[in-house]
Image (spheres, rainbow, N blue to C red):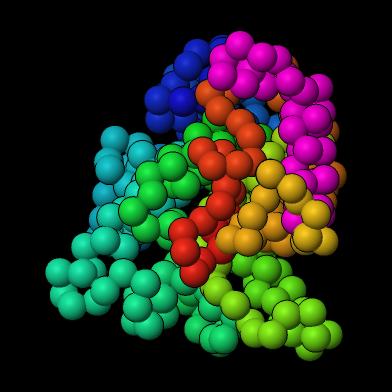
Amino acid sequence: MSKCDACGKTENMPYRCHHCGGTYCSEHRLPEAHDCPGLDDWGDPDGVFDSGFDDSVDDGGGRGLGDRLSVDTGPGSILGYFRGNATYTMLGLMWVTFLLQHLVVLVGIPIGGPTWSAIFTLQPQHPEYVWTWFTSVFSHAPLSLGHIALNSIVIFFFGRIVEDYVGSKKFTILFLVSGALAGLGQIGLSHLLVFLGYQPGLGAGVLGASGAGLAIMGVLTVLNPGLRVYLYFLIPVPIWAITGFYVIVSVAGILGVGGPFTGGNVADMAHLVGLVIGLWYGSQVKGQRRTPDQLQFGGGGRGPGGPGGPGGPGRGRF
């Protein structure tokens, strides 16, 4: 759900203007209804302004976008819902993938086996399996609701704010790119440690959305470092402190001095890469619009039950 930039009305299916980037309700979705700056640069001699939302605007051939695609992409359709809700789409894909991770046993693919890993896990032995760069982002530790549930909480609370700020398309790119690079960073570290002689083998693969989730949190840290996050809905903590905590713990985990906050199956480099990407991207988009000052968040921490806690046997989860 988002608020209309023109009237402040909460909208379940918001419209995003392709010209000014604002979010609007159905009453203010047209450029002329919200005084879109794009109107000043418009020179349509026919007097028809295509806002990018109204598929019924004539394109000269008598067919709208929906007709050309042969599917209904209008605001009232199922596909129209996902047009402004990338956060929930990513969450849905995570849970669908988690279900598939277990259902594949019905077709003879054992959980944790070679075929299963080649589908759902980014493995240091097979970085050339390009599809796993992304499937591993949506996959989570099997038979463990805690891993996916806590990652979902982070993305649910933080993702919606970032998506409203940068737009659904850029949010989706941020999620996929940061998640993939986080996993690649983790297996890259594994290769480096083997090359330097610090570990005998490449070790396990990685899976999980914590890299993307922490990238989202990094963006918010730059946009509004004083944002108050209410851990367990009671304890107000500025988001910069949570991000700083993750940076310290991730670095400590990489150096092998993480203590009780990390473990052998935690993808610390993936966490750190995700945070760095988020902090960088936040610095690129800062100043575009206002962000909220507080947020209630029902969980925190790094250990079991927290985002990116220790993963299942043989896999680094993040």
- Please, is residue 302 above or below residue 105 in the view? above
x, y percentage for residue 136? Answer: 48, 66
- Please, is residue 197 above or below residue 116 in the view? below
Asked if residue 270 lies left or right of residue 207, the reply is: right
Q: Which quadrant of the view contains residue 253?
A: bottom right
Q: Quadrant of the C terminus?
A: bottom right
Q: Residue visible at 64% across and 35% down?
A: 301
Asked if residue 284 lies left or right of residue 51, the reply is: right
x, y percentage for residue 234? Answer: 61, 11
x, y percentage for residue 98? Answer: 34, 55
x, y percentage for residue 162? Answer: 63, 37
The verdict on residue 248 being magenta is yes
Q: What span is colored magenta in the figure?
A: 224-253
Residue sitting at the far left: 106
Residue 5 visible in image? no
Q: Residue visible at 34% across and 53% down?
A: 143
Q: In terms of depth relative to the viewer, which is nearer, 79 or 262?
A: 262
The verdict on residue 126 being magenta is no
Residue 213 visible in image? yes
Residue sitting at the far front: 259
- Please, is residue 271 above or below residue 56 in the view? below
Q: Residue visible at 74% across and 48% down?
A: 259
Q: Residue visible at 54% across and 78% down?
A: 123
Q: In terms of depth relative to the viewer, which is nearer, 263 or 28?
A: 263
